[in-house]
Every structure is written in structure tokens, then in C-alpha cells.
Image: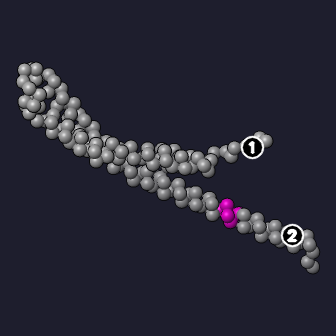
Amino acid sequence: MLTVKSVVYKYLRFFEDIKMSVEQTACEDLKAFERRLTEVIACLHPSTTRWRIVLAVVSICVAIGASQWIFDPETRVVSLAQSLSNHPFFILSTIILIIILLLGVHKRVIAGTIITSRTREVLRDFNMSCDDTGKLILRRRPTNNT
């Protein structure tokens, strides 16, 4: 026999199932987003390391060339153009450094940090954050004290 009470319970169970389904879908979406974010950041790591090494080597070459140029006794005697032409290692390494900086290598060195900071900025609207590896951090909902 159908009573109002049994019909109401049936509908309540139906809506609870829908609610659970929506929560499960949201949870699965968050997990998929987290997996993709960690994958992107992990894939950037080898490239970032490579560019850091390139930038460090070129910077060291510029520093070595500059020290040789500055401590050369002929630097004080000859003109600037002649002094620079006497030190092609310094000129070449400086030109390479300028070229790689113009190509944006300094941005590639910190690409992972840029992605995580921008992701944190977006996730802040959803009371979430992420660590440097891309793992999601859920925050408490703010309490409304009215």
C-alpha cells in the first residue's frame, strides 16, 4: 500500500542518490585535475633543469670572461674597442647570454613556478590551493558570521 510517507521516503532516497552521484563525479573530476596538474609540472621539471644548467654555464662563462677582461693590464692602456677585441671569449659569451635572455630562457627556468602560482590564484576562488608538485590542498569553507 502506498502511503504519503513511503512516497516521500522514496523520493528522498532518489535525491540522496543523485546528490551522492554528483559528489562522486565532483570528486573524480578533482582527482583527474590533480593528476593532470602533477603530470604537467613533472613534465616541466627536466626541461626546467636543462635550461637552468644552460643559463648557469653561460653566466659563469660571462663572469670568467669579464674577470679576465677587467684584470688584463692592457685594458687600462688601449681603447675600449681594442680591449674588447682582445677578449673574444667575453664578447661571445655575453652575446650568447643576451640572445638566450631575449629568447625567454629566464621564463623557462621558472615555468613550473609560474604555472603553480597561477593555478593557486585560480583555485583560491574555490577554497583550494596546490603545492609545488601540483597536489591539491582543500581548505575549510569560510564561516559566515552574520
Q: CA distance from mark 2 to mark 1?
A: 32 Å
* Nearest to viewer (mark 2 / mark 1): 1
Residue 56 is drawn in which quadrant? top left
Q: Quadrant of the C terminus?
A: top right
Q: Examine the structure image and report whether residue 118 is included in the region drawn in magenta.
A: no
Colour scheme of this structure image? one colour
Of 67 and 91, the residue lying toward us: 91
Mark 2 lies on a secondary structure that is helix
Residue 30 is drawn in which quadrant? bottom right
Residue 46, placed above or below residue 23: above
Residue depicted at x 43% and y 44%: 113
Residue 72 is drawn in which quadrant? top left
**Picture coordinates of residue 103, whole percent (x, y):** 28, 47
Binning the other alpha carbons within 10 Å of mark 1 as few (below 14), some (14 to 19) or many (20 upward) gives few
Residue lying farthest bottom? 1
The answer to whether residue 37 is seen in the rendering is: yes
Of 57 and 145, the residue lying toward us: 145
Residue depicted at x 77% and y 41%: 145
Residue depicted at x 83% and y 71%: 10
141 relative position to 134: left or right = right
Which residue range is magenta in the image?
20-24
**Picture coordinates of residue 120, whole percent (x, y):** 53, 46
Q: Amino acid at mark 1?
A: Asn
Residue under pointer 1: 144
Q: Amino acid at mark 2?
A: Val
Binning the other alpha carbons within 10 Å of mark 2 as few (below 14), some (14 to 19) or many (20 upward) gives few
Residue under pointer 2: 8
Of 5 and 115, the residue lying toward us: 115
Q: Earlier in the sequence, mark 2 or mark 1?
A: 2
84 relative position to 7: left or right = left
Q: Examine the structure image and report whether residue 22 is included in the region drawn in magenta.
A: yes
- Considering the whole magenta stretch, tell me its main secondary structure: helix
